[in-house]
Image: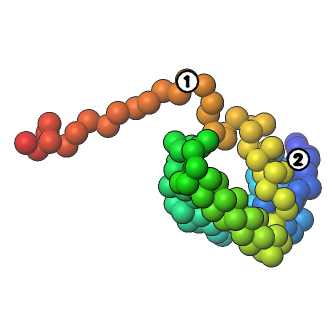
Amino acid sequence: MHVEVKLSKRKCQWCGCAFESAHPSKMFCTKDHQNQFGNFMASRGKVLMPIALSWRTQRGRKGVGSEALAEMVAFLDKCAAELADQGAPPIAQHFKRVRAEGTGIVTGRAVVRVRPSRSKFYG
């Protein structure tokens, strides 16, 4: 018995090339492109997080808050341009797909798991 698998067409979130996949949540044409996209996001996130937290805690105040916002916007524009130069589709498409699958940022109450201190075990 032969089961026909329906392939859906989509664009790779890293390079923008068209590919087909039977798996509904696949967003990258290759594992390498998935890793490159993850590395891109992680490295930019390390830069963006301190700026965003500075803005969030100081927003509405002159000085650090407004400077952090300006720096954050400039950095995000640079990141969007890098992705566009890479050939990636607009990041809003990625965000929309990730949110639809329930794998994005969890809003509301999230369970916080606390890892026990090693000092309890090793003195």
User: Quadrant of the image for the N terminus?
Assistant: top right
Q: Name the residue under label 1.
A: 109
Q: Left or right: where does residue 115 sit relative to residue 30?
A: left
User: Quadrant of the image for the C terminus?
Assistant: top left
Q: How is the image coloured?
A: rainbow
> Is residue 107 shown to the viewer in this render?
yes
> Is residue 34 shown to the viewer in this render?
no
**Residue at position x 80%, y 76% in the image:** 85
Given residues 30 and 48, the one toward you in this image is 48
Residue 34 is labelled as none
Q: Where's residue 46, x and y in %? A: 52, 60
Q: Left or right: where does residue 73 sit relative to residue 11?
A: left
**Residue at position x 84%, y 59% in the image:** 90
C-alpha span from label 2 to label 1? 38 Å
Report the amino acid beneath label 2.
Answer: Val
Mark 2, Cα crowd under 10 Å, few <14 / some 14-19 / many 20+, is few
Q: How many marks?
A: 2
Q: Is mark 2 on a helix, strand or loop?
A: loop
Report the amino acid beneath label 1.
Answer: Arg
Q: Mark 2 points at which residue?
A: 5
Mark 1, Cα crowd under 10 Å, few <14 / some 14-19 / many 20+, is few
Q: What element carries label 1?
A: loop
**Residue at position x 40%, y 32% in the image:** 113
Q: Where's residue 55, x and y in %? A: 57, 49
Q: Is residue 60 above or below residue 65?
A: above
